[in-house]
Amino acid sequence: MTRFTVNGNSIEVDNDPNEMLLLVLRDTLKLKGTKYGCGAAMCGACTVHVDGVATFSCQMSVGDVEGAEITTIEGLSDDGSHPVQKAWIEEQVAQCGYCQSGQIMRAAALLQDNPSPSLEEIKDEMSANLCRCGTYTRIFKAVERAAQEA
Amino acid sequence: MALDRRTFLKSAAGLTFFASAGGLTAVQSLAATSSLDVNLWLTIHSDGTIRVVHPSTEMGQSSHSTLPQMLAEELDANWDDVEIEQLNKDDRRYGNQLFGGVLYTAGSTGTQFYFEPMRRAGAQARDVLLQIAAREWGVDKSALRTEPSLVLGPDGQTAAYGDLAALGADGITVPSADTVTLKSPSEFRIIGHDIPRRDVPAKSTGQAVYAIDVEVPNMAYGAVLRAPVEGETPLEVQDTDARAVPGVIDIVTLPDGVAVVAESLWSALGARGMLDVTWSETSPFRTVNSDETLARYADAALAPGATGAVWVEKGAAAETIAAADRNVSHLYLSDYAYQAQIEPMAAVADVDADGQGAEVWAGTQTQSWTTHTVAEALSIPTENVRINMMTMGGSFGRRTELVQPYVRDAVLCSKAVGRPVKVIWPREDDVKFGTFRPAAAQKLEAGLTADGKGTTSLISQELVA
């Protein structure tokens, strides 16, 4: 039995403690907003917050997060009202959209730590997350917008 | 009842326009040969909502918003009134004529092909609404004009499209798609304007549902151990250890792999690692070498007098180049390339208990070939295949195959275990076993004028793939 918090809710799961956190979030807890892209810490599509830190959920076992507080894209807001999500919509960032949950989670963590990042700081932090459609320029604009409007 | 392509029907819920892709001879002839099964482009409901079909598939290119906008423009609809309906059938009346009528979304051809017929379908519908208003108000159609989703009369009358739809179209004829008047670009309110994409909010909140996200009741998960070399088959499967893994439901032998079906992907992946399979060793691909393949293509492209099937021909390239002051020629090589779409290949299949039909959820670039894949896997007629085309986490050509193995895997697993099964190809599997962009050698020849500037119609390209 592993106990942790997801989006403010206390959770208990009896999955194999070695099971990938990403799969527990998606398939056991049905939080499909977090995406599986590579399973190898290379793309960032699975990024969630673990105790406030942007983390690849494909690189964590569920047993590792005992007692942790996890936030997924669903926990940022349920209606797109989080400043980062609003900026993402305003800048029309998404194309295929598959990486964007992870991008948004990384951007939200960045702004939590550094409310006024420089463009270079934004590029540096966001470089952990890949976008195959190439929406990077809009991602940077959206992070800047979210920083200004938060 | 056979419906002529210009037949216009009244329905209780509103107006349904049966209008095929107009203005293109090939489409007309297709429609004429299958008029019993005429499909609808749009429906105007009496509550004012307008349902418009999206005939392509969405992989990030935005056709899901863009193509219906073409129709909405000529209908002069308020874009907010439009609901988009994904085409989930291999209905060739909607086929992309730039791909021989197959429902196939690739190479930016969706916008190129559907621009004209979808505009004409919208214009036909607008004309019918004008006719209804003219009939109701006892005025000439030419005295009417439209504002978004509204018809306006000469004496200040106004009627919403939905209200006009509710009045019915008795005695009204749909104008020919070929001759219906289209807007001039200066009248455009939607095309060329900055309209937000419909799918962006859901893709910014984690709510967009991709094939890999689909869940249906009683669904199991499949992971496939694939042949180490393309073309090999499993000869002997030792699965005692794999079957002992908690959650494993069954081990299913596929033509080119062995699938573990389990209650979770985690169990399926774990058990897959315990399979001990003896494979055939007869595949001709064992001796294939991509460097040698590319070298052979290059030799073929460079061979004197090399010819091939003509893809497109404009002007007298060969003669013009021969007569040019100076010639330039270069050979370009492109290697096999992994498309690296960010959503791994995934499909959910639910085969009917009698094995004679199936429902499938997948994201592919072609309704036609996904339907074909399922029908072939089960040896059933295509009309027994029910597909749900999901928005895709990128494609880049990865999802165009005539036979889509990830879809087939899900179908065969579902049939074997009698439950819906989601098959996911982990990233490593896709890199190892995916259908790469083909290698190619391209020889480019150009003729130049003496001053060194290229002149028009001087380039010929030879492609060997």
Image (cartoon, coloured by chain):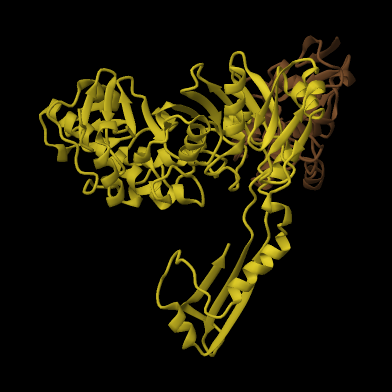
Chain colours: A brown, B yellow
**Residue B305's x, y, as percent?**
52, 79
Residue A46 sits in which quadrant? top right
Residue B126 visible somewhere in the drawing: yes
Q: Quadrant of residue B347?
A: top right
Question: In the rendered image, which quarter contains the C terminus of chain B?
Answer: bottom right
**Closer-to-camera residue (A65/B103):** B103
User: Residue B322: percent from the left, percent from the top?
Assistant: 48, 86
Q: Residue at x 46, y 66 (%)?
A: B309
Relative image position of residue B100 (x, y in whole percent):
40, 50
Q: Is residue B463 left or right of residue B434?
A: left
Left or right of A83, for residue B126:
left
In the displayed structure, does residue B339 sit left or right of residue B453?
right
Please determine whether, in this image, residue A84 is positioned above or below residue B280.
above
Image quadrant containing the N terminus of chain B = top left
Q: Residue at point 21% right, 48% down?
A: B179
Q: Is residue A140 visible?
A: no
| Figure disc tally | 0
Q: Position of residue B194 (x, y in %)?
A: 49, 43
In-front residue for pair B26/A52: B26
